[in-house]
């Protein structure tokens, strides 16, 4: 297996609400919901960076496709890291997320390792870290 990820799919409870959060609130580009003509097929894709997409797919559709029952949500299963170029960008992204309806889990702060970061949860409880790492160049 080559170290290549092309799609990150987030299970959601309300696809329309999730679409509005990511498209209207965070400003991610999408063609909207596609595949609604198929039972369990409705999904929304967002272009992130070259070769990587974010997909929103209802949890019940994932359950139907995989045969795994829908389980209780846990925000500590994984985090999604959004790296930016400055502390000011962290603060701006956190404000944008909050204004879009995210709940702020941890306010942006100086980290023990010399960076600056904060956490928010989207409406489906997925945990995002917005972070400035002085040792990394954030992609444009």
Image (cartoon, helix red, strand yellow):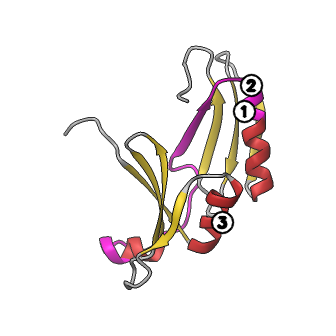
User: Mark 2 = which residue?
Assistant: 87
User: Mark 1 = which residue?
Assistant: 90
What residue is drawn where x is 73% and y is 55%? 102
Residue 113: image location, x then y, percent: 64, 17
Q: What stretch is highlighted in magenta?
A: 64-91
Q: Is residue 122 left or right of residue 92?
A: left
Residue 101: quadrant of the picture = bottom right
Q: How far apart are marks 3 and 2 (CA)?
A: 26 Å
Q: Residue 20 carries which label?
A: 3
Residue 110 visible, this angle = no
Of all residues, the one furthest to the left in this rendering is 1
The mark that comes first in sequence, 3 or 1, is 3
**Mark 2 residue element:** helix
Q: How far apart are marks 2 and 1 (CA)?
A: 5 Å
Q: Which of marks 3 and 2 is in front?
A: 3
Q: In this view, does 105 lie to the left or right of 34?
A: right
Residue 131 visible, this angle = yes
Q: Eyeballing the image, is 105 above or below 67? A: above
**Mark 3 residue element:** helix
What residue is drawn where x is 71% and y is 56%? 25
Q: Eyeballing the image, is 4 above or below 9? A: above
Residue 92: image location, x then y, percent: 77, 37
User: Which quadrant of the rendered structure holds the C terminus?
Assistant: top right
Q: Badge 1, how many Cα within 10 Å: few under 14, some, many 20+?
A: many
**Mark 1 residue element:** helix
């Amino acid at each position: 297996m080559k170290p290549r990820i092309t799609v990150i799919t987030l299970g959601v409870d309300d696809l329309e609400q999730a679409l509005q959060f990511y498209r209207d609130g965070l400003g991610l580009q999408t063609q909207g919901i596609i595949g609604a003509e198929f039972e369990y097929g409705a999904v929304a894709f967002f272009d992130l960076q070259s070769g990587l997409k974010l997909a929103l797919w209802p949890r019940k559709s994932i359950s139907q496709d995989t045969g795994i029952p829908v389980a209780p949500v846990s925000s500590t299963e994984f985090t999604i890291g959004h790296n930016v170029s400055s502390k000011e960008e962290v603060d701006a992204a956190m404000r944008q997320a909050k204004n879009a309806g995210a709940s702020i889990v941890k306010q942006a702060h100086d980290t023990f390792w010399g960076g600056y970061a904060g956490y928010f949860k989207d409406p489906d409880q997925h945990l995002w870290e917005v972070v400035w790492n002085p040792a990394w160049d954030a992609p444009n």
